[in-house]
Image (cartoon, rainbow, N blue to C red):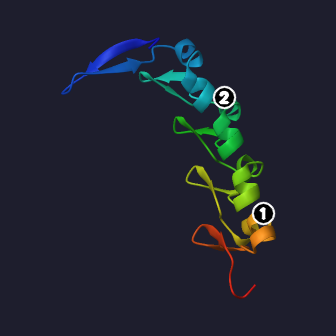
Amino acid sequence: CAGGVRIDPPTVELVCVAESDEQCRASKRCRKRGQCYAELGRCVARDDRDCRKTEGCKLDGLCGAEGGSCRAKQREDCRPTARCIERGECSPRQGVCTVGSDEDCKHSLACKKHGACMEVQGNCVKTELQ
């Protein structure tokens, strides 16, 4: 822990405390999760640019800072991911890329290869009517 340490009662638990933005920027949390700024003793995501550099952005579309975390905020975050290309998870919903419409499914490999071209309860599925 590069920052200070505090003890959280009632159990004696040591908690790492982020004391500065510099400590956060030097941490794995910054590189992996875009959490590069100190806020109330912990590292948080505040800048979309930090989120865009993470593996979470490239793999899962978590490219925008919101509420201290990197989250999927717009379709452009989701589109280049394997999740969108393969399974139609191209629409951001509650911070993650999900299947949001038949249109998402129609452009996916799930549709092209397996006929799963209709959105049903957040999944691309094959229907008898196709």
Q: Residue 46 is drawn in which quadrant?
A: top right
Identify the residue under disc 1: 109
Q: Residue at x 80, y 65 (%)?
A: 107
Please tell me the numbered disc located at residue 50: 2
Q: CA distance from mark 2 to mark 1?
A: 30 Å
* Three-letter amino acid code at the position of disc 2: Asp
User: Vertically, is 68 above or below 27?
Assistant: below
Q: Looking at the figure, which quarter contains the C terminus?
A: bottom right
Q: Residue at x 44, y 14 (%)?
A: 1
Q: Residue at x 65, y 63 (%)?
A: 99
Q: Residue at x 35, y 14 (%)?
A: 5
Is any atom of residue 63 visible in this view?
no
Proximity of marks 2 and 1: CB atoms separated by less than 8 Å: no
Is any atom of residue 110 visible in this view?
yes
Secondary structure beneath dot 1 equals helix
Question: Residue 124 placed where, x, y %?
Answer: 67, 69
Secondary structure beneath dot 2 equals helix
Foreground of the two, 67 or 53: 53
* Three-letter amino acid code at the position of disc 1: Leu
- Decide: few, some or many residues near mark 1? Use Cα within 10 Å; few <14, some 14-19, many ≥20: some
